[in-house]
Image: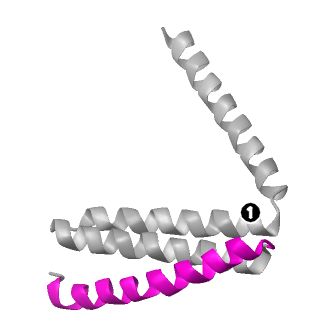
């Protein structure tokens, strides 16, 4: 049994090491646009999860949506920096224009409703 546990542990560590090496290799090969998208999405997901800390469903919704909208804005900014298609550039500008006021509205709501 002990041999099986050690073997299993070594297998997991080897697989984890291989995954980590593969991830690092992929990360190094990313374009600046891919890196920007990845950074924005990672930050968005982490901040969205912060909403789970709130016991009040309305507060959790506002906190999660603020992070979600901010993530969309960051992605739109990446599109504006690296994208080339005029239609996508226009959409990126529209996303920023639409979602920033919604963020502002939710932030104002949180000021009076957060416990």
Local secondary structure at mark 1:
helix
Which quarter of the rendered picture does the C terminus lie within? bottom left
As drawn, is 18 to the left or to the right of 49? right
Q: Locate residue 89: give its quadrant.
A: bottom right
Q: Would residue 79 be visible to someone looking at this image?
A: no
As drawn, is 15 to the left or to the right of 73? right
Point out residue 16 in the picture as x, y percentages from the top left corner: 64, 36
Magenta span: chief secondary structure: helix
Q: Would residue 1 be visible to someone looking at this image?
A: yes
* Magenta stretch bounds: 84-113
Query: Which of the pair 74/90 is nearer the observer?
Result: 90
Relative to 33, say whether 9 is above or below: above
Point out residue 104 in the picture as x, y percentages from the top left corner: 37, 89
Q: Locate residue 60: give its quadrant.
A: bottom left
Point out residue 74 in the picture as x, y percentages from the top left corner: 59, 76
Relative to 68, say whether 9 is above or below: above
Question: How dense is the environment of label 1, judged by Cα within 10 Å: few (below 14), some, or many (20 and up)?
Answer: some
Write the residue at 39% across / 83% down.
103
Check the image and name the residue furthest to the front.
87
Residue 103: within the magenta?
A: yes
As drawn, is 16 to the left or to the right of 83? left
Write the residue at 56% across / 81% down.
94
Residue 93: within the magenta?
A: yes
Query: Which residue matches tag 1?
Result: 34
Point out residue 101 in the picture as x, y percentages from the top left corner: 40, 88
Query: Which of the pair 10/18 is nearer the observer?
Result: 18
């Amino acid at each position: 049994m002990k041999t099986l546990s050690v073997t299993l542990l070594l297998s997991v560590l080897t697989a984890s090491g291989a995954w980590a090496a593969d991830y690092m290799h992929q990360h190094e090969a990313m374009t600046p646009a891919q890196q920007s998208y990845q950074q924005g999405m990672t930050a968005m997901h982490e901040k969205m999860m912060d909403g789970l800390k709130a016991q009040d469903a309305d507060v959790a919704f506002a906190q999660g949506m603020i992070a979600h909208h901010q993530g969309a804005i960051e992605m739109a900014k990446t599109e504006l920096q690296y994208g080339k298609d005029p239609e996508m550039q226009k959409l990126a500008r529209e996303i920023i224009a639409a979602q920033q006021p919604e963020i502002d509205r939710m932030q104002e709501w949180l000021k009076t409703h957060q416990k």
